[in-house]
Amino acid sequence: MRCEIVAVGTELLLGQIVDTNSSWIGEQLALAGIDCLRHTAVGDNRDRMLDAFRGALERSDALIVTGGLGPTQDDITRSVIAELMGAELVRDESLVARIEAVFGGRGRSMPANNLLQADVPVGARPIEQMPGTAPGLVCPIGAEPGVDGDDSPKVVYAVPGVPWEMRQMVEGTILPDLKRRAGISSVIRSRTLRTWGHSESGLAEDLADEIDRLDREGGVTIAFLASGMEGLKVRLTAKAATAEAAEALLADEEARVRAIAGEIVFGVDDQTMESVVLDLLVERGLTLATAESLTGGMIGTRLTEVPGASRAFVGSVVAYDGAVKRDLLGVPADVHVVSEEAVSAMAAGVCAHLGADVSVAVTGVAGPDPQDGIEPGTVWMATCVDGAVEAWRTRWPFDRTRIRQFTVITVLDALRRRLLARPVG
Amino acid sequence: MRCEIVAVGTELLLGQIVDTNSSWIGEQLALAGIDCLRHTAVGDNRDRMLDAFRGALERSDALIVTGGLGPTQDDITRSVIAELMGAELVRDESLVARIEAVFGGRGRSMPANNLLQADVPVGARPIEQMPGTAPGLVCPIGAEPGVDGDDSPKVVYAVPGVPWEMRQMVEGTILPDLKRRAGISSVIRSRTLRTWGHSESGLAEDLADEIDRLDREGGVTIAFLASGMEGLKVRLTAKAATAEAAEALLADEEARVRAIAGEIVFGVDDQTMESVVLDLLVERGLTLATAESLTGGMIGTRLTEVPGASRAFVGSVVAYDGAVKRDLLGVPADVHVVSEEAVSAMAAGVCAHLGADVSVAVTGVAGPDPQDGIEPGTVWMATCVDGAVEAWRTRWPFDRTRIRQFTVITVLDALRRRLLARPVG
């Protein structure tokens, strides 16, 4: 089963938006075990769309078209597919009712143009999932008369360009239909272990024997993905006859990788460093404050992106100005603001000032220029747990943005390790 | 002159990376007045690359290929183009020397594989710009014997997939060469006015007469781009015989749009709300503090993304916990933490606490759940200038992330307007 993706929209060619849909669909196809040969983007132009669709169907068995299903006169995907099929467009009254219901549910009356979205080429069927007002389509290509469209030699799927609408249709209808057509009965599942504290090449070296074993024995594959302040991700992918068997393979492999990688694994899948630290704090009944200089509030920002952060996070003092470090956080007047003494005083001071049990503190030079002869990238970090401060220095070889981002995850990771070593309760 | 872009890389098809290069090149082509018919992504596969390149050259006059120019055996763009041209690959000794010099300059010895990057199809020439170790190529297609390659009927350009290397080559060599081939002597320049405080449809309505005038008279076009917490961008694009004439058209149009849109224009091009507010503060010799609750430090984070923020920004109190609002910022014990009284006390309190001249303060419910019966999206904001507090309430119909983002730009915009109304010095 070979598949291609065609994204429709002049705004894609003009660079007004980036085509993230094709990338997401490509990833899902790979996970489902379906080859994807090509991604194409074309403008809202009948001849060029038809040419792109025909070319894709010559090379491949299935085509996923994104975009051009809206209610305006630029949205011609439905009628171009009808032409490709040599079929009439016929209004589907059940779709009319569903579209009207969506508008009614939002308390709006439906513009007449939206009725065009209920037009379906004869032989095609609407995709069941319809999270917005644009129906998706499953369009059999080349079926002999009397043969069910589900068994057609080729197939075109049309989905809206709106990412969350597209995703529901791909997951709910297209991937299962492609797997059925391809005769794929195996199930692929993946799990991402999130790590911090080791380079990609270093971790690959540590895992080399395990990766060799997997290469020989099969079942699970391992891939690395460096993701900036989200950490270095290790993706495990398992293929098995059933979902249960695939999950069992993943659980076994996760245990093996954790046994090798140890404490650098901070979370799984959607867990972030911030959510993990907050959970550890809540488990231990501790409250957290941050004292930030070069990060300017970014540690607090990240922590409060997690719903329910208020269970443990009380607040921050962002001491960008030296006077604030001294007056509020008790940094002595005679020490430099980028020093071990300064960051230690900040960590202890913010616990006292905000009445928190534990804290993290950072001070440094984000650049681009040196400060008092201290090079950009020089950062002092500290954690304070149960009144005990630990401080250390790092020198990042990065630009301003990444100096700040790497500082955030690094100082939170240090706190995570100290919390793990501290008994619950 | 019709152009296409082919991005090479199996990782693109697998969704491991998103193809932002094609989008960026598409935008540059549009600005240069060159039509782009199609973007394609294919894997690192000889037959499929050749098929994609040939298809593009049948439809179009020029093809820009990104990726596949590295030193590994997967990187076959050079040899596929040689096959397309029916030409031998010959090692270019001057390129060998340049590549060796790059490695030498970085204090590393060159792996032997990198020499493959110096192979050039006979008839092609290296692109002058070479910011990395991968040379780009200009490859004439279909030139009659004896005819200069610069006058060939068609042309393929090959550039690396690394964005900053690709961009220098596109700007330095490919766009000028395409414009020369297309006989385009006109110059296109654009300028982006950044606005906050009006919807896209509202602003389009205000500017409708001006857009009609431009449609009739030509010279400049206007496009809108809603960009979240970066504001609603209004892009002016001018075409003229010279750069000076295009800039003059833009200056005239900017004045016209500003006269209609008024104070909602907060900046131009790379100016951000944060950089504009910081500049206004520095001009007036004022210092700024922030008191943040639901934004958790995001206002401080954004302000300190601007190099030199320390000229005006002294710091923040992130008072996520109610006790911090009361103890540090003087919010009275008997008022709700999401109220006019609370946000006003926060704005005045943080000026006193951090010794700042002006402040912004925010408190609200980011969701997803209501708090004390107050709906998510309910936000109180305040500014304090010269000791005078102004507070107001907003109800955002957004998710947690956008509630926080829109709050940041909105409260900073309110401060901007108050600063503009305050005399300098």
Image: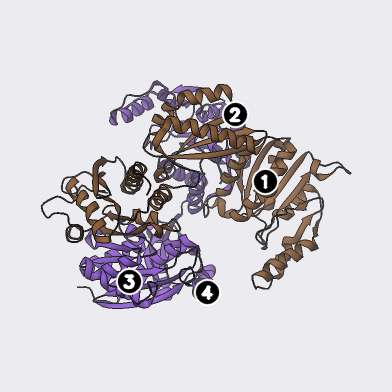
Chain colours: A purple, B brown
Q: Quadrant of residue B206?
A: top left
Residue B133 percent location from the top left of the image: 67, 62
Name the residue that disc number 3 marks: A415
Name the residue that disc number 2 marks: B219
Name the residue that disc number 4 marks: A205
Picture layout, residue A246 above or below residue A160: below
Chain at numbered mark 2: B
Q: Quadrant of residue B55?
A: top right
**Foreground disc of the pair 2, 3:** 2
Picture layout, residue B16 above or below residue A40: below
Viewer-nearest residue: A162 or A332: A332
Q: Are marks 2 and 3 in contact (CB under 8 Å)?
A: no
Type of amino acid under label 3 = Leu
Type of amino acid under label 2 = Gly
Give the quadrant of the N terminus of chain B.
Answer: top right
Mark 1 vs mark 3, CA separation in Å:
49 Å
Mark 2 vs mark 1, CA separation in Å:
29 Å
Q: Are marks 2 and 3 on the same chain?
A: no
